[in-house]
Amino acid sequence: MTSTRDIPENLYSLHSAEELLRQKARSMVAADPRLQLHLAVTEAAMDLADSLRKFDTHDEDLKVAMILGMRTFNAFGASIKLSLSGYHQNSALILRDVMETAFLLDLFAGERPLIERWRFADKKARIREFSPVKVREALDARDGFTSKKRAEMYELLSELAGHPNMKSSWMMRPQKDGEAVIGPFVEATALEAVISEIGRLAVQVGEQLDKFFPANWGLETRVGFAKLKRSWLETFYPTTTAEP
């Protein structure tokens, strides 16, 4: 039988299955206040990015922060969509990009002249001064961190989602000791792992974006994020002040 759809029949069926999985994932989120909090603080960080990009400015350095914020907005949206549709590994791969962008925002927020250097750097200079590892090293040196937690988290996302290797197959298994599967699936542990990482990164992104806001701009959005961030920290890190 010839299909009149504008996409192949199998791809249409795959999309239908993804939508069913999304409904299942939404039900799981609805039953878990912690997952709801992760997504709420993520939405608030995305609102910050949207609010900042609306500020009218001729400051090219500030525009860099706006563009990076917009990049995280798109990345969070894509990562959430993929995770709720059952593509946990692909969702995590996008989160590595968010992490790298958050670190760059952190570096720029602490030393604004670096933005201009980054804007005009050629490829060789950008790799030498602003590669992901150089940015992490600069942040650790600035903050006096020696445990290299930034590097550990980046490498974890790289191994699980960024590079084809044996560990990357872990995120393709609905059950820890089961077989890898082809196509999307929704399972509680995988869903919680990815959404909790989305929330953690959203807090970091929101903290950095807030530092670029001009005085008295976007106050309602900034207050909304601050309230959700405080609730998030009280829920997941009630007594610790840890390195990111």
Image: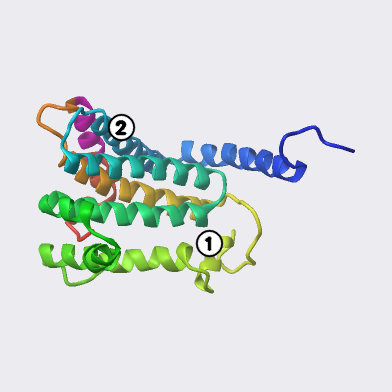
Instruction: Say if the magenta span includes residue 223.
Output: yes
Q: Quadrant of the C terminus?
A: bottom left
How would you rate the neighbour count of disc 1 (Cα within 10 Å): few for under 14, some for 14-19, many for 20 or more? some
Tell me if 194 is positioned left or right of 62 in this view.
right
Tell me if 38 is positioned left or right of 4 in this view.
left
Q: Quadrant of the N terminus?
A: top right
Tell me if 87 is positioned left or right of 63 in this view.
right
Instruction: Pick the residue in front: 49 or 144.
Output: 49
Q: Which residue is mark 2?
A: 50
Residue 128 in sight from this viewpoint: yes
**Numbered circle sitting on residue 206:** none
**Residue type at numbered disc 1:** Met
Residue lying farthest to the bottom in this orientation:
166
Instruction: Say if the magenta span includes residue 10.
Output: no
Residue 224 in picture, x, y percent from top left: 24, 30
Q: Where is residue 179, by image quadrant?
A: bottom right
Q: Where is residue 58, by image quadrant?
A: top left
Q: Which residue is mark 1?
A: 171
Residue 226 in picture, x, y percent from top left: 20, 36
SS under mark 2: helix
Q: Residue at x 43, y 53 (%)?
A: 94
Q: Residue at x 27, y 52 (%)?
A: 102
Q: How many marks?
A: 2
Residues under numbered marks 1 and 2 in contact, where contact means CB atoms less than 8 Å apart: no
Q: Which residues lie in the magenta part?
A: 220-229
SS under mark 1: helix
